[in-house]
Amino acid sequence: DPWFIDQNNVGHLSMQNGLWIRKEGSTSQIVVPNDDSLRHDILSRIHEDPLAGHPGCTRTAELVRRSFWWPRLAKDAENFVQTCDLCQRNKALSGKGHGLLQPLPVPDAPWESVSMDFVVALPKTEGGYDAVLVMVDRLTKMVHVAPTTSSCTAEQTARLFFDNVVRLHGVPKNVVSDRGGQFVSKFWEALCKLVGMRVNLSTAYHPQSDGQTERTNRTLGDMLRNFAGRTPSVWDTYLTAAEFAINNAVNRSTGQSPFFLNYGYHPALPVWRELEV
């Protein structure tokens, strides 16, 4: 590739086991030769991996860069995603939200403030689920999701929140939800009872949603449509894979993936292990 004539374009290179390795900070990337078929195969296998969830152009390129590098990778990723039939058919058009969103203070620590919302009116599954409870850490943007029903009560929501958030991250200082003050008050009371904490409703923070869960809901919906395809009633079997994919993708507002901000490293996709071999 003529690009490699100028070493300044490439960065530090070294030969390891017959492969050119490029160092970028603490990341080691395999330099992919000028082979359109090989590059397309790498893009395809990473973009279409069930644990990646058919991400957009920028996120696809970022996932590839964690292990591989070649000139004009970003442009190749853009071209690939824009011609992905599944993405074009299933992804919702992004647009401006309705109404003004109230600015919320930035939390001081992970899982101190959690936004909570429901995705409803989904095809009913064999297990009777037709909704998803979406819980998002407002600082790191990490997401936890749980299948439920559209009739989920405040008490049932508290149990799901305990199992998916409190069990892993502790009790938050506040919860952001647009479900209404009465629902949030009952939810918080039920949660306090579960964890054996005295009820203090002043800590239940429930202004208009800040838009975080709405964005997550759109992404989650896109992924479930991609995963379930022509059998939409099995969406619940793909829910954990969708959660992983969201948490492993770089978030635009933080510049890092939620997984990395919580745990300090990037998890490997199965396809990376195969391609590295």
Image: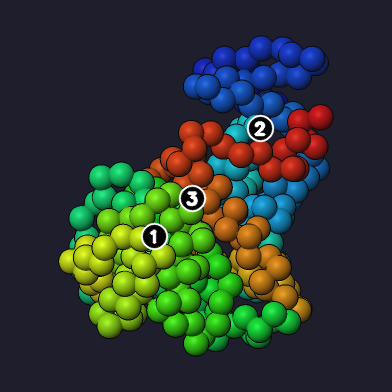
Residue for point 40% across, 79% down: 154
Q: Label 2, on which residue?
A: 68
Q: Which amino acid does label 1 sit on?
A: Val
Q: Which amino acid does label 2 sit on?
A: Phe
Q: In this view, does 135 lie above or below 35?
A: below
Q: Label 1, on which residue?
A: 195
Q: Which of marks 1 and 3 is in front?
A: 1
Residue for point 25% across, 45% down: 108
Q: Is residue 16 above or below residue 40?
A: above
Mark 3: secondary structure: helix
Residue density around tag 1, few if under 14, some if 14–19, many if 20 or more, within 10 Å: few
Residue 150 in percent (x, y) is at 51, 85
Quadrant in the picture for the C terminus: top right
> CA separation, marks 1 and 3?
13 Å
Between discs 1 and 3, the one toward the N terminus = 3
Q: What residue type is labelled 3?
A: Leu
Mark 1: secondary structure: helix
Q: Label 3, on which residue?
A: 168
Left/right placement of residue 33 relative to residue 204 reads right
> CA separation, marks 3 and 2?
33 Å
Residue for point 63% across, 65% down: 239
> CA separation, marks 2 and 1?
45 Å
Left/right placement of residue 229 relative to residue 166 reads right
The reply to whether callout 3 and callout 2 are in contact (CB within 8 Å) is no
